[in-house]
């Protein structure tokens, strides 16, 4: 007598489905963590490459990290004349680095980017670079005004490199501001200082850690959640660290007083340095703490309104939303 093959019963099918669901429940969080870890590691590698590009460029400038105002100086003689402080901002900095081949547009955007306004500079036009015509990078943001490159009443579509988190930004990363301060004079160099942060994941506006301005910041979603800031930071010796605080332990404490003429802080008075807060609070250039680490996305130069490019020194004290951009 022939027997028909026995199929699965409903109970057996439900048991198998329950086991599969259980396995998925166990594996998916692990896969998500592995994916996030991979993004964090790739992000760290890109930040290190960005800093490496700056250090490589410094080898051609007597150890000083590149400045747009040094590359495109004031005056009619190429390579001569005073530095043009009007063009010193992060948009022009990275535009010049791409133009010179020290880095590409892709490494400037994090693989874990959470802000839809941050995209690679795919429209960067290398054909615009012409030193003979005094153009050393795609000049859309030469003076941070956002004009097109065609001239005339109706300019061509904007190309170039942009650094405004509110409209369009071609970099995920915050960098030391390149305003004319003692901070720049001392640390915007290939110093090998393992205690000074140079570039990394951006932070919250002014380094705040409470309130809606903290919890609503898109930078929190890059590596963590809305409850804490996580990020990779590259230091001036080119090592990169991943941390969960805006006050890294290896960063030097603030040792000097806020303004010149006071008493230096010592012992218990020494304060921890917030990576995303300007801790100088002093208009005088002499009074700026050269040890203060501050990482931002600098959209404009505070000196662009100076017709002769003369440096001013009150760049980022007080509310200056026109110069710095957060999300």
Image (spheres, rainbow, N blue to C red):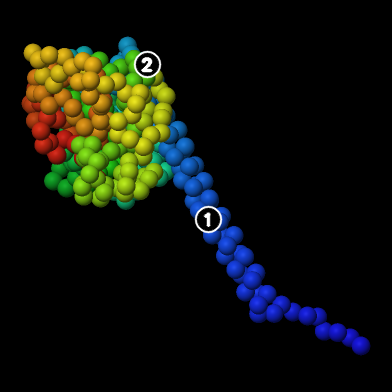
Split into 4 quadrants, where in the image is the C terminus?
Answer: top left
Q: Which residue is mark 1?
A: 28
Q: How far apart in space, not on screen, are marks 1 and 2 (Cα)?
A: 42 Å
Q: Which residue is mark 2?
A: 192
**Picture quarter containing residue 163?**
top left
* Mark in front: 1 vs 2: 1
Residue 196 or residue 191, whichever sits in front: 196
Question: Is residue 118 at all visible to an observer of this figure?
Answer: no
Q: Position of residue 171 (x, y in %)?
A: 32, 39
Residue at position x 36%, y 37% in the image: 244
Q: Which is nearer the N-term, disc 1 or disc 2?
A: 1
Q: Secondary structure at mark 1?
A: helix
Residue at position x 9%, y 15% in the image: 262
Residue 217 or residue 171, whichever sits in front: 217
Split into 4 quadrants, where in the image is the N terminus?
Answer: bottom right
Question: Is residue 272 at all visible to an observer of this figure?
Answer: yes
Q: Position of residue 132 (x, y in %)?
A: 26, 24
In the rendered image, the vertical position of residue 247 relative to residue 73, given as above or below: below
Q: Position of residue 111 (x, y in %)?
A: 42, 43
Q: Secondary structure at mark 2?
A: loop
Residue 3 or residue 53, whichever sits in front: 3
Left or right of 293, for residue 281: left
Q: Residues within 10 Å of mark 2 (few under 14, many from 20)?
A: some
């Amino acid at each position: 007598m022939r027997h028909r093959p026995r199929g699965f019963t409903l109970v057996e099918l439900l048991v198998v489905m329950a086991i599969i669901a259980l396995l998925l429940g166990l594996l998916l969080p692990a896969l998500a963590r592995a994916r996030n870890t991979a993004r964090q590691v790739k992000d760290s590698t890109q930040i290190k490459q960005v800093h490496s590009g700056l250090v490589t460029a410094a080898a051609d400038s007597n150890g000083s990290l590149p400045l747009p105002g040094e590359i495109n100086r004031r005056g009619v003689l190429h390579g001569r004349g005073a530095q043009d402080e009007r063009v010193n901002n992060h948009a022009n900095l990275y535009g010049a680095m791409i133009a010179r081949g020290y880095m590409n547009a892709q490494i400037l955007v994090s693989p874990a980017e959470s802000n839809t306004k941050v995209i690679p500079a795919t429209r960067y036009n290398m054909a615009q670079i012409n030193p003979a015509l005094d153009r050393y990078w795609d000049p859309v943001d030469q003076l941070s005004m956002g004009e097109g490159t065609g001239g005339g009443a109706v300019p061509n579509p904007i190309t170039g490199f942009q650094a405004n988190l509110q409209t369009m930004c071609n970099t995920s990363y915050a960098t030391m501001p390149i305003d004319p301060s003692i901070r720049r004079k001392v640390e915007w160099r290939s110093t090998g200082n393992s205690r000074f942060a140079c570039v990394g994941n951006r932070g919250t506006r002014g380094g705040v850690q409470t309130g809606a301005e903290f919890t609503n910041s898109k930078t929190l979603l890059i590596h963590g959640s809305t409850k804490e800031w996580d990020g990779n930071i590259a230091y001036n010796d080119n090592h990169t660290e991943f941390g969960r605080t805006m006050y890294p332990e290896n960063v030097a404490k603030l040792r000097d007083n806020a303004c010149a003429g006071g008493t230096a802080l010592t012992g218990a008075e020494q304060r921890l340095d917030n990576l995303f807060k300007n801790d100088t609070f002093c208009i005088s250039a002499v009074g700026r703490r050269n040890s203060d680490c501050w990482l931002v996305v600098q959209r404009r130069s505070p000196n662009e309104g100076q017709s002769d490019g003369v440096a001013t020194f009150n760049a980022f004290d007080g509310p200056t939303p026109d110069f710095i951009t957060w999300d």
